[in-house]
Image: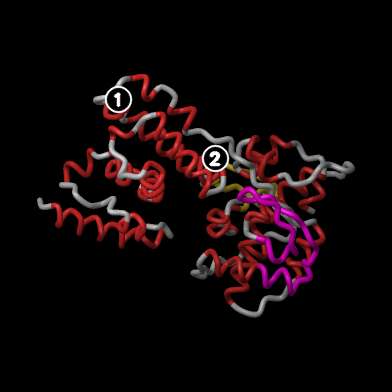
Amino acid sequence: MGTSVIKNKRKLLIKQTSQQGLSWKKFINEGLADEYGEEDWLNSFVGGFVERYKQNAIAMVRFKKAIGKKPEWLDITDENLLKFRQYMLGKSSKNRTQKLLSAVSTYISDNIDKALMCKEEYCLMDYKNILTVQVESARLFYLTENEIKKIDRYLTHSNSEDFVKRVFMIMAYTGARIEDSKRMSLENCDYKSDTLTYVASGLNMMCCLPIHKNLKQYLSYREDCKLEKNQFNAILRSICFKAGVRGKTSIFKKGKTIRDYKYNLITPDIARCSFATNLYLRDADINLIAKMMGVDLSLLLHRFICEEKRNKVSSLNFFK
């Protein structure tokens, strides 16, 4: 099969996956998809990586810029990987950089014979350490129980507002992920034990927790509304503003501290932070909170608990 046909096939692949929000145009413009037959493409450093990590193709664009040429297996040395790492840190946050470096590191490990081909072993001795960056944990914020009540009392004015409020409140009263909250219904409730049970999609973990007194109204219907992420967030922020959630707060994200009004910064994850933090402030056991949310303890402590304890309040009263 000719090179031009292979190139056109890859352009079609790129067109089909561009909706993932990736910079495939840059990938093509840099010539990274040129000059390969089909078998050569799959065996090449760039082609094999992109076929496996389509969502991380931008890494190859930046690798080329870092070393000044299209990366081939012969170019995979500690020296070039260090240039790549430094270039990445100048272009992205530490968290984004680590995600891409981790993909490259795994790819090299799984193809170590190709990486060592035609070069001395000492040229590639420290690649795992080079392709590791200490990530910065994002610090979000939470809504107090009174602020959650304000959103709960807000009267919606459209189907999209109704959908966004419903999903957000389910997340705030269960700590569930947005995907799980959209699927949740009264079928998840056991009225004999007054508990709600669902399978958390992240860790495929069974979660069980008491049913919040205000939760059932949001589980009684499950009408879906197709909204993009930015549309969902815009409606959520509008609801918060109109509901009176207007205090200021600070978050640490992508290496920067941002201070603004809560209604400008709120995202669906803030509902989960609110669930975890409000229970934590009521002295609930952190292991129990993690199980109810379907997350590991480390993630709970570093991402979802956003406040230090001040005084002890009964945790069970949260659901009543």
Magenta span has 260? yes
Q: Mark 2 falls on what kind of element?
A: strand
Say above or below: 275 vs 168: above
Q: Residue furthest left?
A: 1
Callout 2 environment at 10 Å: few (<14), some (14 to 19), or many (20+)?
A: some
Task: Specify which label sits upstream in the sequence, 2 or 1.
Answer: 1
Residue drawn at x 68%, y 50% as measured from the top left: 252
Judge whether residue 194 can be spotted in this image. no
Q: Residue furthest bottom?
A: 157
Q: Is residue 87 left or right of residue 167?
A: left
Q: Mark 1 falls on what kind of element?
A: helix
Residue drawn at x 45%, y 34% as measured from the top left: 82
Residue 167 position within the rendered picture, expressed as x and y whole percent measured from the top left: 61, 62
Q: Nearer the viewer, residue 287 or 268?
A: 268
Judge whether residue 223 can be spotted in this image. yes
* Residue holding disc 2: 205
Q: Nearer the viewer, residue 187 or 212?
A: 212
* Residue holding disc 1: 116
Quarter of the rendering containing residue 237: bottom right
Span shown in magenta: 237-266
Tag 2: residue type? Met
Q: Is residue 279 left or right of residue 119?
A: right
Q: Give the number of the mark in front: 2 or 1.
A: 1
Residue 272 position within the rendered picture, expressed as x and y whole percent measured from the top left: 66, 51
Residue drawn at x 61%, y 36% as measured from the top left: 296
Q: Nearer the viewer, residue 276 or 131?
A: 131
Tag 1: residue type? Leu
Magenta span has 257? yes
Say above or below: 189 vs 113: below
CA–CA distance in space, label 2 to label 1:
40 Å
